[in-house]
Image (tube, rainbow, N blue to C red):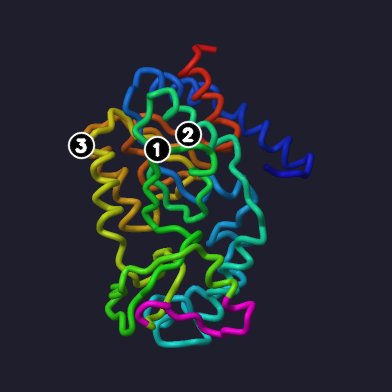
Amino acid sequence: MPDDPEDDDALLDDALLDEGAVVALAELLGRSRRVVFFTGAGVSTESGLPDFRSSEGIWTRYDPRRLTFEQYVASADVRALHWRMRREFFALGARPNAAHLAVAAMETAGRSLGVITQNVDGLHTDAGSLTVVEIHGTARRITCLGVAPHDGVATGCGWSAGIEWAFERLDAGGADPHCPVCGGLVKSATISFGQALDADALARADALLAAADAVVVVGSSLQVYPAAGLPARAAARGVPCAILNREPTPLDDDVDVVVLGSAAVLLPRAVRTALTGV
Protein backbone atom coordinates (compact mmCIF):
# COMPACT_ATOMS: atom_id res chain seq x y z
CA MET A 1 0.00 0.00 0.00
CA PRO A 2 1.25 3.54 -0.63
CA ASP A 3 3.15 5.26 2.16
CA ASP A 4 2.49 8.80 0.90
CA PRO A 5 -0.47 10.40 2.75
CA GLU A 6 -1.58 11.97 -0.51
CA ASP A 7 -1.75 8.49 -2.05
CA ASP A 8 -3.83 7.30 0.91
CA ASP A 9 -6.23 10.19 0.31
CA ALA A 10 -6.46 9.19 -3.35
CA LEU A 11 -7.42 5.64 -2.37
CA LEU A 12 -10.10 6.94 -0.06
CA ASP A 13 -11.42 9.11 -2.86
CA ASP A 14 -11.61 6.00 -5.03
CA ALA A 15 -13.83 4.37 -2.43
CA LEU A 16 -16.39 7.14 -2.86
CA LEU A 17 -16.40 7.29 -6.66
CA ASP A 18 -19.33 4.98 -7.31
CA GLU A 19 -20.96 3.55 -4.22
CA GLY A 20 -23.70 2.00 -6.35
CA ALA A 21 -21.20 -0.05 -8.33
CA VAL A 22 -19.54 -1.34 -5.15
CA VAL A 23 -22.95 -2.35 -3.79
CA ALA A 24 -23.71 -4.15 -7.08
CA LEU A 25 -20.40 -6.03 -6.83
CA ALA A 26 -21.18 -7.02 -3.23
CA GLU A 27 -24.60 -8.26 -4.30
CA LEU A 28 -23.11 -10.35 -7.12
CA LEU A 29 -20.59 -11.87 -4.69
CA GLY A 30 -23.30 -12.38 -2.08
CA ARG A 31 -25.54 -14.48 -4.32
CA SER A 32 -22.68 -16.53 -5.79
CA ARG A 33 -21.24 -19.74 -4.37
CA ARG A 34 -18.61 -20.62 -6.98
CA VAL A 35 -16.84 -17.35 -7.72
CA VAL A 36 -13.69 -17.42 -9.83
CA PHE A 37 -11.43 -14.38 -9.62
CA PHE A 38 -9.26 -13.31 -12.56
CA THR A 39 -6.52 -10.89 -11.52
CA GLY A 40 -3.92 -8.74 -13.25
CA ALA A 41 -1.16 -6.26 -12.54
CA GLY A 42 -3.52 -3.75 -10.92
CA VAL A 43 -3.72 -6.00 -7.86
CA SER A 44 0.04 -6.23 -7.43
CA THR A 45 0.83 -2.57 -8.09
CA GLU A 46 -0.89 -1.79 -4.79
CA SER A 47 1.73 -3.99 -3.11
CA GLY A 48 4.44 -1.79 -4.60
CA LEU A 49 5.25 -3.89 -7.66
CA PRO A 50 5.50 -1.85 -10.87
CA ASP A 51 3.43 -2.92 -13.83
CA PHE A 52 4.89 -3.28 -17.29
CA ARG A 53 3.28 -0.58 -19.40
CA SER A 54 2.82 2.52 -17.23
CA SER A 55 5.10 5.58 -17.28
CA GLU A 56 6.98 4.07 -14.33
CA GLY A 57 6.60 0.46 -15.42
CA ILE A 58 9.20 -2.22 -16.01
CA TRP A 59 9.38 -1.54 -19.75
CA THR A 60 10.76 1.95 -19.07
CA ARG A 61 13.92 0.24 -17.80
CA TYR A 62 13.94 -2.94 -19.87
CA ASP A 63 13.17 -3.02 -23.58
CA PRO A 64 10.52 -5.72 -24.14
CA ARG A 65 11.80 -6.20 -27.68
CA ARG A 66 14.98 -7.64 -26.17
CA LEU A 67 13.22 -10.07 -23.87
CA THR A 68 11.43 -12.40 -26.25
CA PHE A 69 11.69 -16.16 -25.84
CA GLU A 70 13.75 -16.57 -29.02
CA GLN A 71 16.19 -13.83 -28.03
CA TYR A 72 16.56 -15.39 -24.57
CA VAL A 73 17.45 -18.70 -26.17
CA ALA A 74 19.88 -17.12 -28.64
CA SER A 75 21.78 -14.63 -26.47
CA ALA A 76 23.70 -14.93 -23.19
CA ASP A 77 23.51 -11.13 -22.91
CA VAL A 78 19.71 -11.26 -22.98
CA ARG A 79 19.76 -14.02 -20.34
CA ALA A 80 21.95 -11.81 -18.13
CA LEU A 81 19.44 -8.98 -18.59
CA HIS A 82 16.63 -11.34 -17.60
CA TRP A 83 18.36 -12.35 -14.35
CA ARG A 84 19.07 -8.69 -13.54
CA MET A 85 15.38 -7.87 -13.98
CA ARG A 86 14.42 -10.76 -11.72
CA ARG A 87 16.78 -9.56 -8.98
CA GLU A 88 15.23 -6.11 -9.16
CA PHE A 89 11.77 -7.64 -8.93
CA PHE A 90 12.48 -9.61 -5.75
CA ALA A 91 14.46 -6.78 -4.13
CA LEU A 92 11.17 -4.88 -3.81
CA GLY A 93 10.05 -7.28 -1.07
CA ALA A 94 6.38 -7.08 -2.00
CA ARG A 95 3.74 -8.46 0.36
CA PRO A 96 0.04 -9.21 -0.18
CA ASN A 97 -2.33 -6.28 0.13
CA ALA A 98 -5.98 -6.14 1.14
CA ALA A 99 -7.17 -7.18 -2.33
CA HIS A 100 -5.13 -10.40 -2.20
CA LEU A 101 -6.50 -11.09 1.27
CA ALA A 102 -10.08 -10.46 0.13
CA VAL A 103 -9.72 -12.99 -2.69
CA ALA A 104 -8.36 -15.55 -0.23
CA ALA A 105 -11.18 -14.82 2.24
CA MET A 106 -13.80 -15.78 -0.33
CA GLU A 107 -12.12 -19.15 -0.87
CA THR A 108 -11.70 -19.73 2.87
CA ALA A 109 -15.42 -19.06 3.30
CA GLY A 110 -16.22 -21.71 0.69
CA ARG A 111 -17.60 -19.16 -1.73
CA SER A 112 -14.83 -19.16 -4.34
CA LEU A 113 -13.35 -21.91 -6.47
CA GLY A 114 -10.03 -20.06 -6.70
CA VAL A 115 -8.15 -17.43 -8.66
CA ILE A 116 -6.68 -17.28 -12.14
CA THR A 117 -3.91 -14.70 -12.24
CA GLN A 118 -1.80 -13.05 -14.90
CA ASN A 119 0.67 -12.08 -12.17
CA VAL A 120 3.90 -14.00 -11.59
CA ASP A 121 4.69 -12.74 -8.07
CA GLY A 122 3.12 -15.48 -5.93
CA LEU A 123 1.31 -12.98 -3.69
CA HIS A 124 -2.05 -14.78 -3.94
CA THR A 125 -0.45 -17.86 -2.40
CA ASP A 126 1.20 -15.74 0.29
CA ALA A 127 -2.23 -14.28 1.10
CA GLY A 128 -3.70 -17.74 1.72
CA SER A 129 -5.37 -18.63 -1.58
CA LEU A 130 -5.14 -22.39 -2.11
CA THR A 131 -6.31 -22.73 -5.70
CA VAL A 132 -4.15 -20.40 -7.79
CA VAL A 133 -3.72 -20.83 -11.54
CA GLU A 134 -0.73 -18.74 -12.64
CA ILE A 135 -1.56 -18.39 -16.31
CA HIS A 136 1.71 -16.57 -17.07
CA GLY A 137 3.82 -18.76 -14.79
CA THR A 138 5.76 -17.84 -11.68
CA ALA A 139 8.90 -15.79 -11.10
CA ARG A 140 9.62 -17.76 -7.94
CA ARG A 141 10.87 -20.82 -9.77
CA ILE A 142 13.15 -21.62 -12.67
CA THR A 143 12.72 -24.39 -15.19
CA CYS A 144 14.77 -26.20 -17.81
CA LEU A 145 14.06 -25.04 -21.36
CA GLY A 146 16.14 -27.77 -22.98
CA VAL A 147 19.29 -27.70 -25.06
CA ALA A 148 17.63 -26.38 -28.21
CA PRO A 149 14.15 -24.97 -27.51
CA HIS A 150 12.46 -23.45 -30.55
CA ASP A 151 9.23 -21.91 -31.84
CA GLY A 152 8.37 -20.64 -28.37
CA VAL A 153 8.17 -24.13 -26.88
CA ALA A 154 10.37 -25.38 -24.04
CA THR A 155 11.78 -28.84 -24.66
CA GLY A 156 13.45 -29.32 -21.27
CA CYS A 157 14.01 -32.39 -19.16
CA GLY A 158 11.51 -31.34 -16.50
CA TRP A 159 14.05 -30.11 -13.93
CA SER A 160 12.95 -27.15 -11.82
CA ALA A 161 14.13 -25.30 -8.72
CA GLY A 162 13.51 -22.17 -6.72
CA ILE A 163 14.77 -18.90 -8.21
CA GLU A 164 17.41 -18.81 -5.46
CA TRP A 165 19.26 -21.63 -7.26
CA ALA A 166 20.05 -19.29 -10.16
CA PHE A 167 20.94 -16.36 -7.93
CA GLU A 168 23.37 -18.50 -5.93
CA ARG A 169 25.19 -19.59 -9.08
CA LEU A 170 25.31 -16.08 -10.44
CA ASP A 171 26.72 -14.85 -7.13
CA ALA A 172 29.36 -17.57 -7.28
CA GLY A 173 30.56 -16.29 -10.65
CA GLY A 174 28.48 -18.42 -13.01
CA ALA A 175 27.52 -15.94 -15.72
CA ASP A 176 24.95 -18.15 -17.47
CA PRO A 177 23.40 -20.94 -15.35
CA HIS A 178 22.43 -24.14 -17.13
CA CYS A 179 20.38 -27.17 -16.10
CA PRO A 180 22.37 -29.48 -13.80
CA VAL A 181 20.62 -32.54 -15.24
CA CYS A 182 20.72 -32.15 -19.03
CA GLY A 183 22.82 -29.02 -19.58
CA GLY A 184 19.94 -27.15 -21.17
CA LEU A 185 19.11 -23.49 -20.79
CA VAL A 186 17.20 -22.41 -17.68
CA LYS A 187 14.82 -19.49 -17.24
CA SER A 188 12.42 -18.22 -14.63
CA ALA A 189 9.18 -20.18 -14.98
CA THR A 190 7.35 -17.20 -16.48
CA ILE A 191 5.87 -16.86 -19.95
CA SER A 192 8.00 -14.59 -22.11
CA PHE A 193 6.93 -12.79 -25.29
CA GLY A 194 6.76 -15.39 -28.03
CA GLN A 195 6.53 -18.30 -25.60
CA ALA A 196 3.56 -20.66 -25.64
CA LEU A 197 1.31 -20.67 -22.59
CA ASP A 198 1.45 -23.78 -20.45
CA ALA A 199 -1.24 -26.18 -21.66
CA ASP A 200 -1.87 -27.56 -18.17
CA ALA A 201 -2.41 -24.06 -16.73
CA LEU A 202 -4.85 -23.24 -19.53
CA ALA A 203 -6.76 -26.47 -18.90
CA ARG A 204 -6.99 -25.74 -15.18
CA ALA A 205 -8.21 -22.21 -15.89
CA ASP A 206 -10.84 -23.48 -18.32
CA ALA A 207 -12.03 -26.04 -15.76
CA LEU A 208 -12.43 -23.38 -13.07
CA LEU A 209 -14.36 -21.07 -15.37
CA ALA A 210 -16.59 -23.90 -16.58
CA ALA A 211 -17.65 -24.53 -12.96
CA ALA A 212 -18.01 -20.85 -11.98
CA ASP A 213 -21.33 -19.20 -11.19
CA ALA A 214 -19.65 -15.77 -11.29
CA VAL A 215 -16.37 -14.33 -12.57
CA VAL A 216 -14.78 -11.24 -11.04
CA VAL A 217 -11.94 -9.56 -12.92
CA VAL A 218 -9.71 -7.47 -10.65
CA GLY A 219 -6.90 -5.19 -11.74
CA SER A 220 -6.59 -6.37 -15.34
CA SER A 221 -6.70 -4.22 -18.44
CA LEU A 222 -7.82 -7.34 -20.36
CA GLN A 223 -5.50 -6.46 -23.22
CA VAL A 224 -2.95 -9.29 -22.99
CA TYR A 225 -4.07 -12.30 -25.02
CA PRO A 226 -4.72 -15.18 -25.00
CA ALA A 227 -5.16 -14.94 -21.21
CA ALA A 228 -7.56 -11.99 -21.45
CA GLY A 229 -9.87 -14.10 -23.58
CA LEU A 230 -10.71 -16.36 -20.64
CA PRO A 231 -13.14 -14.00 -18.84
CA ALA A 232 -14.48 -12.84 -22.20
CA ARG A 233 -15.51 -16.40 -23.04
CA ALA A 234 -17.19 -16.77 -19.66
CA ALA A 235 -19.17 -13.58 -20.23
CA ALA A 236 -20.17 -14.80 -23.70
CA ARG A 237 -21.57 -17.99 -22.13
CA GLY A 238 -23.78 -15.89 -19.88
CA VAL A 239 -21.83 -16.33 -16.64
CA PRO A 240 -22.41 -13.25 -14.42
CA CYS A 241 -19.24 -11.15 -14.57
CA ALA A 242 -17.87 -8.08 -12.83
CA ILE A 243 -14.78 -5.96 -13.50
CA LEU A 244 -12.93 -3.89 -10.89
CA ASN A 245 -10.13 -1.85 -12.41
CA ARG A 246 -8.74 1.68 -12.28
CA GLU A 247 -9.35 2.20 -16.01
CA PRO A 248 -12.03 1.01 -18.46
CA THR A 249 -11.43 -2.31 -20.24
CA PRO A 250 -12.55 -3.65 -23.63
CA LEU A 251 -14.98 -6.01 -21.85
CA ASP A 252 -16.85 -3.38 -19.81
CA ASP A 253 -19.88 -3.26 -22.11
CA ASP A 254 -20.33 -7.04 -21.93
CA VAL A 255 -20.38 -7.60 -18.17
CA ASP A 256 -22.93 -7.12 -15.39
CA VAL A 257 -20.97 -4.84 -13.05
CA VAL A 258 -18.12 -2.39 -13.65
CA VAL A 259 -16.35 -0.73 -10.71
CA LEU A 260 -13.66 1.89 -11.33
CA GLY A 261 -11.13 2.38 -8.55
CA SER A 262 -8.61 0.80 -6.22
CA ALA A 263 -8.70 -2.99 -5.85
CA ALA A 264 -7.14 -2.82 -2.36
CA VAL A 265 -9.85 -0.44 -1.14
CA LEU A 266 -12.99 -1.52 -2.97
CA LEU A 267 -12.71 -5.32 -3.21
CA PRO A 268 -12.36 -5.82 0.58
CA ARG A 269 -15.47 -3.67 1.11
CA ALA A 270 -17.49 -5.73 -1.36
CA VAL A 271 -16.24 -9.06 0.02
CA ARG A 272 -16.93 -8.04 3.62
CA THR A 273 -20.50 -7.10 2.73
CA ALA A 274 -20.99 -10.31 0.75
CA LEU A 275 -19.76 -12.50 3.62
CA THR A 276 -21.20 -10.64 6.61
CA GLY A 277 -23.96 -8.43 5.27
CA VAL A 278 -22.26 -5.39 6.80
What residue is at 37 percent from the left and 37 percent from the top?
A: 114
Q: Is residue 164 left or right of residue 258?
A: right
Task: Give neighbour class at mark 3: few <14, some 14-19, many 20+ (Cα, 10 Å).
Answer: few
Q: Residue shown at 43%/33% (left/top)?
A: 258
Q: CA distance from mark 3 to mark 2?
A: 23 Å
Q: Residue 228 appears at what percent x and percent y?
A: 35, 51
Relative height, residue 131 to residue 267 (above, below)? below
Q: CA distance from mark 2 to mark 1?
A: 7 Å
Q: State how far apart marks 3 and 1 are (Cα).
A: 17 Å
Instruction: Give the image quarter of residue 13.
Output: top right
Q: Disc 1 designates what residue?
A: 37
Image marks 2 and 1: residues in contact by CB distance under 8 Å: yes
Q: Earlier in the sequence, mark 2 or mark 1?
A: 1
Task: Choose between 173 and 201: the one closer to the eye.
Answer: 173
Q: Residue 84 location in percent, x, y?
A: 60, 74
- The residue pinned by badge 2 equals 103
Q: Nearer the viewer, residue 59 or 167?
A: 167
Q: Nearer the viewer, mark 3 or mark 1?
A: 1
Tell me the amino acid under the disc marked 1.
Answer: Phe
Magenta stretch?
A: 169-182
Residue 79 drawn above or below residue 162: below
